[in-house]
Image (spheres, coloured by chain):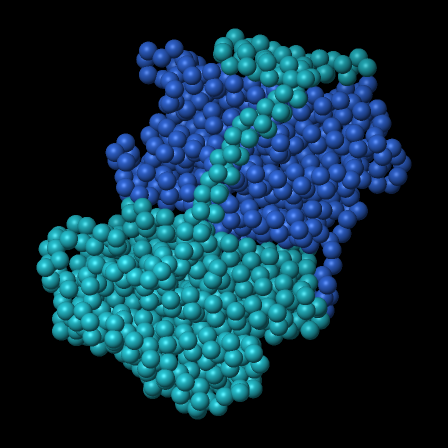
Chain colours: A cyan, B blue
Amino acid sequence: MENLIAPLIAAPLLGAAVLLLGGRRLDRVGHWVGTLLSATSFVFGLILFADLLGKDAEHRTLTQHLWTWISVGSFQADVTFRLDQLSMTFVLLITGVGSLIHLYSVGYMEHDERRRRFFGYLNLFLAAMLLLVLADNYLLLYVGWEGVGLASYLLIGFWQHKPSAATAAKKAFLVNRVGDMGLSIAIMLMFTTFGSFAFGPVLSHTGDTSEGKLTAIGLMLLLAACGKSAQVPLQSWLGDAMEGPTPVSALIHAATMVTAGVYLIVRSGAVFNAAPDAQLAVTVVGAVTLLFGAIVGCAKDDIKKALAGSTMSQIGYMVLAAGLGPIGYVFAIMHLVTHGFFKAGLFLGAGSVMHGMNDEVDMRRYGGLRKYMPVTFITFGLGYLAIIGFPGLSGFFSKDKIIEAAFAKGGTEGWILGGAALLGAAITAFYMTRVMLMTFFGEERWRNQPTRSPQAPSAEPAAEHRGEHAEPHPHESPKVMTIPMIVLAVGSVFGGAFFSIGDRFLHWLEPVTGHSEGDSPLSAAAVTGATMVCLVIGVAIAWAQYGRKPVPVVAPRGSLLTRAARRDLLQDDFNHVVLVRGGEHLTRSLVYVDHTLVDGVVNGTAAGFGGLSGRLRRLQNGFARSYAVSMFGGAALLVAATLLMRAV
Amino acid sequence: MSFPLLTATAALPAIGAVATAAVPAARRSAAKWLALLVSLATLALAITVLVRFDPDGTRYQLTESHAWIKDFGVRYELGVDGIAVALIALTAVLIPFIILAGWHDADPLETGSRRWRPTQGFFALILAVEAMVVISFEATDVFLFYIFFEAMLIPMYFLIGGFGDRAHEHGEEAAATQRSYAAVKFLLYNLVGGLIMLAAVIGLYVVAGNFSLQEIAQARTNGSLHMATSTERWLFLGFFFAFAVKAPLWPLHTWLPNAMQESTAPVAVLITAVVDKVGTFAMLRFCLQLFPEASKWATPVILVLALISIVYGALLAVGQRDIKRLVAYASISHFGFIIMGIFAMTSQGQSGATLYMVNHGISTAALMLVAGFLISRRGSRLIGDYGGVQKVAPVLAGTFLIGGLATLSLPGLAPFVSEFLVLVGTFTRYPAIGVIATFGIVLAALYVLVLYQRTMTGPVKPEVSAMPDLRARELVVVAPLIVLLIFLGVYPKPVTDIVNPAVKQTMSDVHKSDPKPEVEAAK
């Protein structure tokens, strides 16, 4: 059965190759080829899943060795895949949600002349992401890790004739590369410590080395995770990544790729378990990001950017849980899966709204859309209830468990982390209610607003030539788009309960990640109660602000915090001043230094011996003659040298 | 006597060069085809070398040895180890692409131009360079090596000085002046390096009494040839200086951007992908074998210079406005990696460095040749003159992106394997240097993606709106290079299998073995 792992990756890879090399001939069927291969991969995943379920919990690991990739001295890297409960979970999420989003894109990208290429990139992404979660060593994981980065780069910049899209794509790749430095160094540290970087040898020998080494490895892995999962301080790229087509935001920048950092930490659990300082750093990053993303999400008027802030925040929850160690690993992954359902659903809903609204993204120009888009409204609404943790829906189960686990960490740390998670729950309820109210309720603010909002030009360039001056006529999206939304809404509603009843998810993952209950100062009921109170407060404040009062079409100036949050809490400004400007000055002065100083000094030194620079300057003026002269000089030198040897 | 395969591999392009030059002036295209055929035949010979070479056999194989200048013990002595075989193969693979990419670079200019463009000469010179590079990789006699190491400057000089880009922002006069400056600078830098090496070569003869690499190296290992510490260091420095100019290593690098900027793209590839490799190759073969103790003595300084090259080259690449200069500085950064890998003195570092030489050759060829196609369409080398090319020439843009991704060492493409090996090989012995060098991977992404963004994305500039996409000839150049980049990225074993035993030998020459991991049991 393990021989099915390679075809699982190969199917979308084949799709990418065929679609990208196939040329125009495939324009008419390309999107179906891509969708079909993605679905094929999902079917392979299901077969493997059934196979794993048929085995004992302890023997649910399949490995497939293909070939030796790199072998130099003791440095051995193999192309070997490993399928266990953790990677299986990801495989189903990636191919399942991935196939739904392929299907949705058939409708969403219908009018784009480069649709075939879009599907090629999506398939490339699937292949890379599957490689990432199926690799049996860190170096092969690195290939998938950068592969998804490449796919993300290509898809963020899909409409690359727009400078903002091209810039956002480049930024995403660069910020991720900073994280990749962390992954590179972590692998090198593993090699010097364990003589290997395969999961087996590294993760089973963490007891044989010092805590200091493990802390260093853990912190480097955390740096990598921060880049890929948009965690503070490497979060700045995710908001800009919304320049990509909305299905991309749903699949890559919400449901799958951005959760790769969580995968990396949970996969490396053995390292973190033995390095408490690194774990603490992970929890701090998670807690800070969950608040950071939530605050940013409150201030954005662009529906996709509000959702991007939310994604950052929800991944913060997962990272926080992953940092808690065995108390939290299972719940990090469980929230990752439920989040995959409801966040992908929310993004697809946002795309559906934009589709019906001339690609407008400014929520201040929405309002009252529930009448015009009933399916979108209901599916989006269910996703909304799931993410805020409405009792009985997915988010309720998965987020509640993380908050409980944070308290169970114990001590002051437990209180601080648990408190941050609770506060985050309140803010989540606030900003998601705000999105919901501004989009589907209230006045129809898109009427009589012929001009576009100047500060937030739409990400979708199709709007530019689709008669944007006309009043939008909101309409429901075609079935090919609404069916994936409905499926994801079903997952958003029932996923959490399904996983939690009888602790199914826990029993499934525990053999890989381990589990411990921790030592909570609060009872589970008390935590749930507190979470519910936070939820009600958040919803109530949003209702008071956006439900009872009309929403102004032009954003009010807002408080200092609001204005900072609109600018991503000023960290982009910081990056711009320190890194971009500073870097420009540095490179410019270096160009000058190289031209005058280094060149000058070397030429000058030589001049001291042979008048090189003077001769160079003179030679700039003539050509044919000087060729001859200097050539003669060179040749004469050679001959003289040879003769000299004879004569000595 | 068996067939002198190594001599033939070098002699064939040399004879081809003469024959190409002798084609009558009216039959230009015959000259081109002849040069292409000769380069392909040379490739066939190089493949024969590759096949006949037994990686697990003796160190130098396919050896040939004849007396030459008897009085001084100069011998015509050839032999290849795994490192040389890999680099000969690289050279032989790249030359046909260089010829094909430069197919029209030496066509006569429009009437009214003062400049004479000898087509035959252009292709003959390329073949001449190939011949000399190949024999430099083969020579195991120090003097023989020196002769060709120096002699290849002559055809290179004419290629740089005589054949520039057609268009130039300051007109033809200015172009000729700048070209001549670049060519002379190239020549003088390398001649100075060569002169210093010549002194060291003579010094070596005085100490050792002959020029045979194998004999001297053997005498050094078994102790029969003793060198005073200071003598060994001086001789080492003499050799190293010449190779560091050629490679080039900071701060001796400034000739490279000029030379690459002024020459046509295929010649620029010839410089950086082929000729410069002789420098790094010679460090491995001559510096480490002949002067092992001095090599170790100089290691800290060389590693720091290599590290400066990596970061400095990359930062300067970021600041360039000229596409070709950008690639030149990127190459300087990459040469830093190669030299760092060689002097890290670990098997990963040195195998990685050799693989890096091969991969850098292919990736730079892909990037630079596509850049050349781009430049020939618009008639400008300035990045700012482009924009939105992706929209009008998607295949050109796509291949340019793949060349760029290879340059930034994207995992899955060949350069990643070598770069990671060099990094890990350095890190095991010098963690701090290894960590700083990883900044290079961020900077590489910066200069490649900025270049791509400014030239290929954004609104279509009016000047590029009529730009044709890649033609068949150009696709034939680029596609195989891309296939090679992908193949060696997922399966580098064919190269590492050949290189590893040779590196093992070199490691034992310098009496070094790989550091052991902390936890042995994990193996």
Where in the figure is residue A210, as x and y percent of width and height? 70, 68
* Screen quadrant of the C terminus of chain A: top right
Q: Residue at x 48, y 38 (%)?
A: A585
Q: Is residue B244 above or below residue B445?
A: above
Q: Is residue B94 above or below residue A215?
A: above
- Residue A115 in the figure: left or right of residue B254: left
Where in the figure is residue A256, as x and y percent of width and height? 40, 67
Where in the figure is residue A64, as x and y percent of width and height? 53, 69
- Residue B26 in the figure: left or right of residue A72: left
Where in the figure is residue A503, as x and y percent of width and height? 45, 88
Q: Residue at x 72, y 30 (%)?
A: B239
A469 or B484, nearer to the observer? A469
Residue B285 in view in this figure: yes
Q: Quadrant of residue B456?
A: top left
B169 or A302, nearer to the observer? A302
Residue A81 in view in this figure: no
Q: Is residue A7 above or below residue A84?
A: above
Q: Is residue A608 above or below residue A286?
A: above
Q: Quadrant of residue A471?
A: bottom left
A561 or A66, nearer to the observer? A561
Q: Residue at x 36, y 39 (%)?
A: B455
Badge count: 0
Q: Residue at x 87, y 41 (%)?
A: B222
